[in-house]
Amino acid sequence: MLEKFLKQTQFKSQQDFIDNLQIEVPENFNFAYDVVDEWARIAPEKKAICWTNDKGEHIDFTFADMKKYSDQTASYLQSLGIGRGDMVMLILKRRFEYWFCVLALHKLGAVGIPATHLLTKKDIVYRANAADIKMVISVGEPAVTQSIRDALPESPTIQTLVSTGPQIPEGFHDFHKGIIEAGPFVRPAHPNNNDDILLLYFTSGTTGDPKMVIHDYTYPLAHIVTASYWHNLHENSLHLTIADTGWAKAVWGKLYGQWLAGATIFVYDHEKFTPADMLQMIQDHRITSLCAPPTIFRFLIREDLAKYDLSSLEYCTIAGEALNPAVYESFLKLTGIKLKEGFGQTETTLSLFTPPWVEPKPGSMGIPNPLYEVDLIRPDGSKAEDGEQGQIIIRTPNRKPLGLYKGYYRDPELSHETWHDGIYYTGDIAWRDEDGYYWFVGRADDVIKSSGYRIGPFEVESALMTHPAVVECAITGVPDEIRGQVVKATIVLAADYRDRPQQEMVKEIQEHVKQVTAPYKYPRIVEFVTELPKTISGKIRRIEIREKGK
């Protein structure tokens, strides 16, 4: 499949990759027709999805199945009035119906809005009115159903509710009954142009309402790099990305690039993450490739990995937050696998990464994806030198790079604020070493300014993670009259250390940080907690820690 879109598919070095990576973008490209249906034509029995859940259910779907079910779903949605440009919210967790729906929306030229099942009434009302959402397709769980019902009186654009079950709530159409009874699907004469909106993601910043990130129909092709040259997938790969479908990471690791590479997607539909269960899945299903946020790997390395046969695992990648070198070293020692880090945002695809032919540097995000002209700049806009902190930017002097967002929907002012004069501003701070590797410092809003020093949370967290008592940690700044801000560490202790006197542990941890990194970075405030606040995708919510500490 890659040969359809790449003139060269194999690369020997980074320079070869930079010089010869060229993705051909067809006119009116549509991933559902041009990739999924094409696989169904040339290899109908090829496995597309291996789906299982925490109740012991298991279903395999071939590409012929995916064409069949996406066609049925498209026909059904057509009968309910969905067509080109219509906005449809998907609250489907890790249910297999998500893949039917998202492909069906592509086939109709409609806009998919993936969303988490944790949305409240207020969240749904905001989203419905901000994007003129016409339909909601959701799991039939009481909490989700109630939030949707509560939101309806204040969401006048929502015309139709569809439920995948298992229980079909009153007022909702029955998804499975609908697709079974749907008539033959008739492909629209012209479902989309390349610059039409394909996906809309609501992504929360540190302040204000969630932003509406929109991507066009060419976006999936940018994930060729994600899957083939970061996940290192091939046609015999069975790939697991641990992510809920409500977040952009799902299409990074559970859809576009994986099927472009011809790999099979493994989906474990579970309610609560349990490290032992995930390791059992890897063992029992012979998973070959794993991608997860650092939080997941932190928990995996604390299990007795010797109890599991992980010999099928060939490759592991990591994203979502910066990787602490201590986690990298522990995982390498336990498995022999070098974690390959990557960096990107909802607004982009993979921007920085460690390709297979490049040796990883533990803690580094890697090097630029040739699809993007990545650089670092100082606050005054001048180019930052190697070794100097600066904001990560993507230069766009002549055109929109493949995979970069179209802007923020209905918000030209915010779009211009983050992307103007040929530069997209990520808001993330990093530094670059002499070999061209980038090292994460923190969000611009998270960098701590204490007694004239600029302290990145990640560098202190990395030092803390080398102490055996620390399972997880988050560094935030706390206002201080003398120093401006002081460093605060919020820490989850390992079980063996929880009964130790707190003051003794505080002093020991502070001294440890002073020894591992520059003394001025040590946390003057240390708080022990049982767990850190996180998003559903596993990212630590530092803003919540900061707000709580005020």
Image (tube, helix red, strand yellow):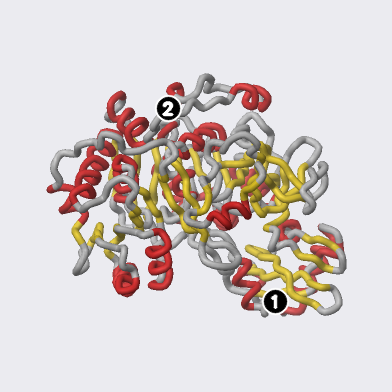
Quarter of the image holding residue 512?
bottom right
Considering every residue shown, the one lying at the far top of the view is 7
Closer to the chain start, of discs 1 and 2, is 2
Callout 2 amino acid: Pro
Residue 333 is at least partly visible in this image: no
SS of the residue at dot 2?
loop
x%, y% of residue 408?
52, 53
Can the viewer see residue 56 in this picture? yes
Residue at 56 percent across and 38 percent down: it is: 400
Q: In which quarter of the image is the C terminus?
A: bottom right
Q: Which residue is at 35% across, 57% downward? A: 89
Relative to 390, residue 27 above or below:
above
Q: How crowded is mark 1: few (under 14 residues within 10 Å), some or many (20 or more)?
A: few
Q: Where is residue 284 in the image (x, y as percent from the top left)?
A: 40, 45
Front of the two marks 1 and 2: 2
Which is nearer the eye, 321 or 465?
321
The one of 509 and 164 positioned closer to us in this rendering? 164
**Which label sits on residue 26?**
2
Query: Which kind of residue does numbered mark 1 sit on?
Result: Arg
Identity of the residue drawn at 19% across and 39% down = 185
Q: Mark 1 points at which residue?
A: 500
- How many marks the image carries: the answer is 2
Residue at 80% over, 69% down: 510
Residue 92 at x, y = what percent?
Answer: 34, 56
Residue 4, by quadrant, is top left
Q: What element carries label 1?
A: loop
Crowdedness near tag 2: few (<14), some (14–19) or many (≥20) residues, C-alpha within 10 Å: few
